[in-house]
Image (cartoon, rainbow, N blue to C red):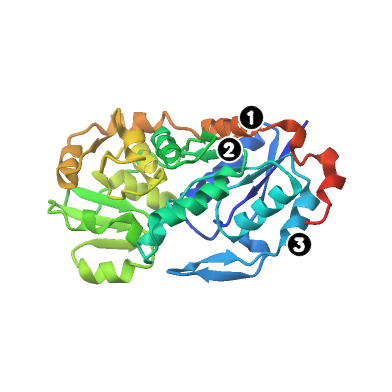
């Protein structure tokens, strides 16, 4: 019998980030297994711009609106992917109706906030514990992140890995770029939490290239006139840039995974990163160099095998990502799910 999953997410198109990419690929992969994912996103509501990120718009949902969406779908499973306004309202409805739900932890919200506002990280982690511990499991992308979150008081932690498109991101797309080599590349949102100056300040030979958009782009362009800021690139154009670089430099210390690391590896581009959560999990046994000295890591990565980087990426797949996600849902007590047979119960007042 076909099952339906409702995924509630505040992160959605036209955003370009790991959360949106993961959810897109998840929906495609589970369909092959007779599972349909329906998304509840900001598209259906009035929105407002996220402070510090005016291009990201958050929903202004009411409890009645979200409750009606759940009633209309009557899903077999409910997964709340983000802790934004939509996630908060959906969580409240699930708790009120005693509907089980799972959550996922994609973004280091406490570090994100404290980098911009004088709010202690402990306060934000307290709030996140209330959010995630009230559900039937919190999914995280890596083992080390799970260990870290458990130490912070989070419960019922489940693994949910990520994948990469190894057809799009392919070493065969390598081109000769009109830049001095070696080419050191970074791809991602150009924002304070990505710690880009740790890469851009390095004394490296050749060229530094940054692909991506974000609130710090204009400032960093002015501050680093010798760096090649290419803005947002997509599809085969982005894949060709990955494949044409010599080393991918990942300076972030707070990412929970880093899909861009897998995209670089799949393109045959070795990675240099700090030895922190996410890079440790992905590169701990090959494909890159981890060091607290990021400059030395970038230089050492030049000598790594591009074929080994590619082989490392091939160990990650979106089908395994989907399998883990569905396995995590299957672990929740079936009798309490918002199934199709419980349609009348779902129509109770939100």
Q: Residue furthest right?
A: 344
- The label number, if any, that marks residue 137 in the structure image: 2
Q: Looking at the image, which residue is at 73% across and 44% down?
A: 98
Q: Which residue is mark 1?
A: 331
Q: Looking at the image, which residue is at 42% across and 51% down?
A: 108
Question: Where is residue 267 shown, x and y percent of the image?
Answer: 35, 40
For mark 3, give the secondary structure: helix
Q: Which residue is mark 3?
A: 64
Q: Mark 1 near mark 3, Cβ–Cβ under 8 Å?
A: no
Q: How busy is the neighbourhood of tag 1: few (under 14 within 10 Å), some, or many (20 plus)? A: few
For mark 2, give the secondary structure: loop
Question: Where is residue 226 shown, x and y percent of the image?
Answer: 18, 64
- Asked where in the image residue 219 lies, by quadrant, the reply is bottom left
In-image side of 25 versus 180 (left or right): right
Q: Mark 1 near mark 2, Cβ–Cβ under 8 Å?
A: yes
Q: How busy is the neighbourhood of tag 2: few (under 14 within 10 Å), some, or many (20 plus)? A: many
Q: Earlier in the sequence, mark 1 or mark 3?
A: 3
Name the residue nearer the viewer: 293 or 199: 293
Question: Where is residue 195 shown, x and y percent of the image?
Answer: 29, 56
- Asked where in the image residue 58 lies, by quadrant, the reply is bottom right
Q: How busy is the neighbourhood of tag 3: few (under 14 within 10 Å), some, or many (20 plus)? A: few
In-image side of 44 versus 111 (left or right): right
Total numbered circles: 3
In-image side of 323 versus 187 (left or right): right
Residue 232 seen in the figure: no
Q: Mark 2 near mark 3, Cβ–Cβ under 8 Å?
A: no
Question: Where is residue 247 shown, x and y percent of the image?
Answer: 24, 44
């Amino acid at each position: 019998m076909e099952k339906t999953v409702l995924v509630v997410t505040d992160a959605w198109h036209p955003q370009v980030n790991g959360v949106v990419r993961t959810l897109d690929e998840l929906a495609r992969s589970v369909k092959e297994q007779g599972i349909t994912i329906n998304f509840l996103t900001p598209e259906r509501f009035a929105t407002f711009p996220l402070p510090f990120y005016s291009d990201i718009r958050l929903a202004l949902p009411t409890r009645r609106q979200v409750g009606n969406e759940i009633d209309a779908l009557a899903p077999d499973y409910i997964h709340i992917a983000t802790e934004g306004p939509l996630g908060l309202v959906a969580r409240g409805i699930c708790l009120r109706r005693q509907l089980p739900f799972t959550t996922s932890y994609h973004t280091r919200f406490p570090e994100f906030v404290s980098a911009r506002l004088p709010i202690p990280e402990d306060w934000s982690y307290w709030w996140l514990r209330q959010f995630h511990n009230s559900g039937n499991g919190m999914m995280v992308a890596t083992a080390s992140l799970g260990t870290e979150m458990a130490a912070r008081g989070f419960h019922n932690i489940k693994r949910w890995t990520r994948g990469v498109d190894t057809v799009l991101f392919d070493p065969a797309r390598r081109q000769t770029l009109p830049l001095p080599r070696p080419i050191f590349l970074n791809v991602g949102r150009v924002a304070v939490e990505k710690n880009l100056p740790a890469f851009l300040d390095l004394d490296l030979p050749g060229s530094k290239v940054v692909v991506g958009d974000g609130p710090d782009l204009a400032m960093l362009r002015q501050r680093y006139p010798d760096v090649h800021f290419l803005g947002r690139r997509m599809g085969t154009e982005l894949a060709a840039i990955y494949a044409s670089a010599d080393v991918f430099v990942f300076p972030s210390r707070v990412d929970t995974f880093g899909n861009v690391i897998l995209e670089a590896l799949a393109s045959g581009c070795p990675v240099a990163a700090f030895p922190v959560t996410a890079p440790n999990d992905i590169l701990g046994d090959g494909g890159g160099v981890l060091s607290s000295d990021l400059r030395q890591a970038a230089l050492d990565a030049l000598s790594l095998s591009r074929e080994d980087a590619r082989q490392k990426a091939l160990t990650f797949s979106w089908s395994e990502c989907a399998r883990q996600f569905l396995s995590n849902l299957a672990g929740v007590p079936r009798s309490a799910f918002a199934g199709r047979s419980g349609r009348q119960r779902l129509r109770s007042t939100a």
